[in-house]
Image: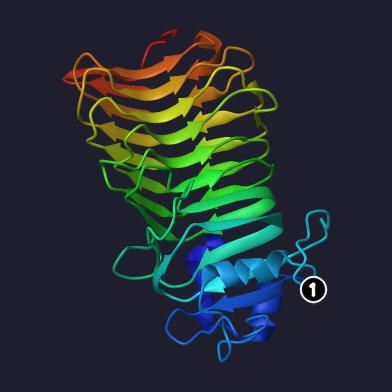
Amino acid sequence: MSDIHSHNFADLSDEVLAVKFPGATIVRVDQMKGSDAHTGGKSWKKPYYTLQAALNFARYELGTTSLSYTDKNRNFVVLVKPGHYNEGEILFSGYNIRLIGCGPLVPGKDYGVSINYDGAADATAAIAFSGSGISLENLHIYCDFAAPAIYCAGGDNNAIKNCVIECDGTLATYGIHMASMKGSRIEGNVIQGAKTAGIWVDGGADHYFINGWIENNTIHSNVENTTGILVDVDNTCYNSWIRRNWISLTNGSSCKGIDINTTAGGPLAADNYVSVPSSATPIEHAGGEQFWLGNHTAAGTTNADPAPAAGA
């Protein structure tokens, strides 16, 4: 994440951007000065107005309005200037698209790039995507309807990092819902107020949690009996980990900080810091002790540092 932290990309010249993002087509979005009538968002003088228009351009076959589902040799970077992007569901699929918010180190609702679902139509998430090589970076996302803030419907080698995901504490179900974690990374995010779970890796046929990780996220919720990180049963799982996350849940004896229900191959839960109310469960792992290493937990005033193993 060092490239996000080092520069405000909106201030960099085309020459410097070419070095930062070699071979990439740069697409620009500016809520204050943009227009969706601009083609390509090639400069800050002619950026797009909406994220959806910019993402559509990044996933179309060049020079057409036909979606590119098979061209894996794509390389697009969508840079977004600070502003409030109040759109309907942002929905896209494709390959090798990075959506990056410019501006402050820590994105927020009143500054930076803030994405708010406008409620114009029923949506599956504030941002829903599928494909491979997709990255969401340095964004603030607010969700106040009965759906996840971010939903990845499938794909591999995707990343969600350095985002602030704010759920309303009443309706929003998940901060991040991943249908697949194959080669994917969720790291460095702040997630608050999710009703059901901060991060959910769901299970079923062709669902994978392999060669990926959930790492260095901060998850907080005062919703009753919520979960911090939930991994469903029936995931093909190996060479993956949930590591060094900071989880604080404050309401309900049925809270679970980390709830891992898959038994075969992991993921390894290591060096996580979890605080839940009395009688709640800080960490539960159906895989057993070999997938549990050096976690630090508190349930009310009962502390375990490092925490002992516990099965489902």
Q: The C terminus lies in which quarter of the figure?
A: top left
Q: Which residue is mark 1?
A: 62
190 or 290, nearer to the observer? 190
Locate residue 166 relative to residue 63 in the image: left or right: left
Image x and y of residue 109, in percent:
31, 64
The answer to whether residue 269 of the structure is visible from this angle is yes
Image x and y of residue 41, in percent:
62, 81
Callout 1 secondary element: loop
Q: Residue furthest front?
A: 121
Image x and y of residue 56, in percent:
65, 67
164 or 50, nearer to the observer? 50
The answer to whether residue 294 of the structure is visible from this angle is no
Image x and y of residue 276, in percent:
25, 25
The image quadrant that residue 304 belongs to is top left
Mark 1: which amino acid? Leu
The image quadrant that residue 59 belongs to is bottom right
The image quadrant that residue 198 belongs to is top left
Classify 81 as above or below 77: below
Classify 110 as above or below 15: above
167 or 64, nearer to the observer? 64
Q: Residue furthest bottom?
A: 45
Report the residue at 45% width, 27% height from top: 230
Classify 20 as above or below 16: above
110 or 287, nearer to the observer? 110
Q: Count every numbered label the image shows and give the total.
A: 1
Q: The N terminus lies in which quarter of the figure?
A: bottom right
Q: Residues within 10 Å of mark 1 (few under 14, many from 20)?
A: few
Locate residue 208 relative to residue 52 in the image: left or right: right
Locate residue 63 relative to residue 227 in the image: left or right: right
